[in-house]
Each structure stands twice: as C-alpha cells, then as structure tokens.
Image (cartoon, rainbow, N blue to C red):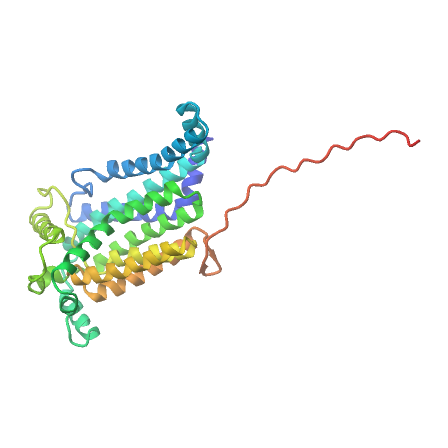
Amino acid sequence: MQVRRWTSSLRDDFGYAWVAGLAMAAATAFIAVVYDLPVRDPDGIIPSYIRMPLIILVAILADIVPRVLWRARRAPRTVGATWLEVTRERWPASHWRFAVGGVLAWYLTYATFRNIKSFVPFVNEHVYDEGMAKLDRILWLGNNPSTVLHDLLGTQWAATFLSLVYIIWIVLVPATIAIALVFTRNTHAGSWYVTAIAFDWALGAAIYLMFPSIGPIYSTPQLFDDLKHTYVTDLANSMWADRVTVLADPWAADGLQTIAAFASLHVGIMVTICLVVRAIGLHRWIQVASWVFLGLTVVSTIYLGWHFSIDAIAGAALGAVTFWAAAMATGNHVGLRPQLRATEPVEEPVVEPVKQEQGPTL
C-alpha cells in the first residue's frame, strides 16, 4: 500500500518532470558512452545530493520551529507535544511524499543538465559566437549592447551591483524549489513550478547541443577590460580554466565545463518564475519584485558579458514555452490556457438527523 501511494504521488505530481529527467539521463549515458566521457556530480565541495536535502531540511525546520515557538508561547506545554502537533498538522505522509518526490525529480534533471552542458564542446565543435554578435549589432543598430550599457551605467558601481544580482540568481533557483515543495500546501502550484524548471533544464540542454556558444566575455574579452573587478570576474576566470582543463583531458579533470551562452537560462528561468507567480496569484509585491528582478537579470547578463542580447530573447521564449508546457503536463490549464487548478475541497460526511418516533396524538 505504501509503495502504491509513493508511485501514485510521483506519477500524479511530477510524472512529466520524471519523464524529462529520465530522458536526460538516457541522453547523458548515451553521449558518455559514444564520446568516452565521464559522468560526474555537478557540484564540488558540497555535492548537490547533500546540499539540496540540507536546503529542504532547513526549509522544513523554518516551517515548523516558528510555529512551535508561537504555540508554546500562547499555550504553554511541553515542547515535545507541541512539536508533534505541528509536525502532524504540517507534514502528513502525503506532503512528505510530495516534497521528497519533487526534490528527486528536480535533482535528476539538474544533475543530467550539468553533465550534458559539459559534453557540448565534444558533441558539437562549432561555436556560433560570431553569428550571435552580428545579430546583436543588427538589433542594436550597429552597436555592441554591452558597450552601450557600459557607457550608460558606467563600469564601477554598476559592475558591483549587477554582479550581486547575478550571484542572487544562483541561490534563487534552489530557494524557490524549497518554497514550492515545503512552504506551499497548494500541491498543484508546486508541481507546476517544479515541472516547469525541469522542462527549462531539458530544453536548455538540447539548445546548447544544437547551438554552442561561449558568450561575449570569452569571445571578445577586451570589451570588458574596464569593468571593476568583482566576484563575477573571478568566477568567469575560474569557469574558463575549468573548460580548458576539461577539454584537455575530461577524465583527468575534477569537475565539469559549465560555459554555454545560447539560450540564457538565467533569463529563461526568471521568465518561468514570473509567469508562474502571476498565474498562481501570489501577492502583488511578489509579482512586481519578480518582474523587476527579471529586468535586472537581463541587464546583468548582457552588461557582464555572460550573454548576447539574442541569448536573452531566446531565453525568454524558452521560459514562456516551458511555463505553458508544464501547465499542460500538470493539468493546470483550461483548454490551452494555463490556469491553476482549484484545490478540491474535502467532502465532509453527511450525517442524517435522527428521527424521533412520535407517540400517539392526544
């Protein structure tokens, strides 16, 4: 019975996320065998199979502990009794199945995405940066977009601020996954979001293989020489060193190469977040903050040289497509229009009133 409940939960909530993950796992294994490449854990110091459960655990504690303290203050009794009460209320078996299933589906797509991204230079040796740069100059009326932004915003304080935006995005995705799986009790919304992110990884990996590019920071580094040195500068240098090491001998390298510019998944995932936040009707300030951060993300990726502007356009289209596809996959739609499914109310048993026998009428 328990196994059936687990499989039913995985199928109903994250079935298509698992389909995407398993397809990516098959592609990862196929490419690894054909091109004689190693499959590695995508993270270094703290592997993501340890880091992500820790993030979820911290999120669970953040969900439970404040409630325990608040109830203990209002109605003093043993902490253990209050803890059990809150845990049973917030974390029944059904929600444990939902959260664990979502984490596993997300991690499978993430880990395989990172490996496929590392395989790109071996599968497709062509680099499309020159063509991307030409498209950018056409879109920007003969100008280079990063140079325009440097002239407009300067190369000092803006570099620091936009580097911070880039760093915030790095922690945003696992944080939002934790929110979708831990804090929300609307599982329709949570499964929609996690499935959309899985689709982002899958479609992004396919596009990387078809249209490899390394981005302006590497193809025309002289355009970024005047930028203030920030953490992102060190990150860019580190990523290039990893790429050189992996290309020299992938089996001797400790990590993965992580450079791929088209399409921008920074922009794509932010578009997905914005559309999901709007569709599920979160507070207006959250919606506004999401769109503002999307705008800052677009500016930062172009300003810092991670992406061409055409990458951002393609990323936005990718994020919109995966938002729609995940709505279809999770049943959050009416016709072809994404719309959050209403949570079905629990039907209370109807208790018929007991009829009393009446005595003879006097």
The reply to whether residue 325 is in sight is: no
One can see residue 248 in this view: yes
User: Which residue is depicted at the point 23% across and 47% down?
Assistant: 28
Pick the front one: 266 or 69: 69
Q: Quadrant of the C terminus?
A: top right
Query: Where's residue 247, x and y in %?
Result: 9, 50
Judged left or right of residue 99, residue 131 is left
Work out whether 25 lies above or below 273: above
Q: Residue at 45% across / 31% down in the picture?
A: 74
Question: Residue 344: x and y, percent?
Answer: 53, 46
Report the front residue among 147 and 12: 147
Q: How many marks?
A: 0
Closer to us: 145 or 268: 145
Placement of 216 over or under 178, stated as above or below: below
Vertical placement of 74 versus 135: above or below? Answer: above
Please identify the quarter of the rendering in which residue 152 is found. bottom left
* Residue farthest along the right direction in this orientation: 362
Residue under the point 17% across and 73% down: 137
Depth order, front residue of 297/3 = 297
Q: Measuring from the top left, give residue 262's x and y in whole percent.
A: 21, 60
Percent x, y of residue 163? 17, 55
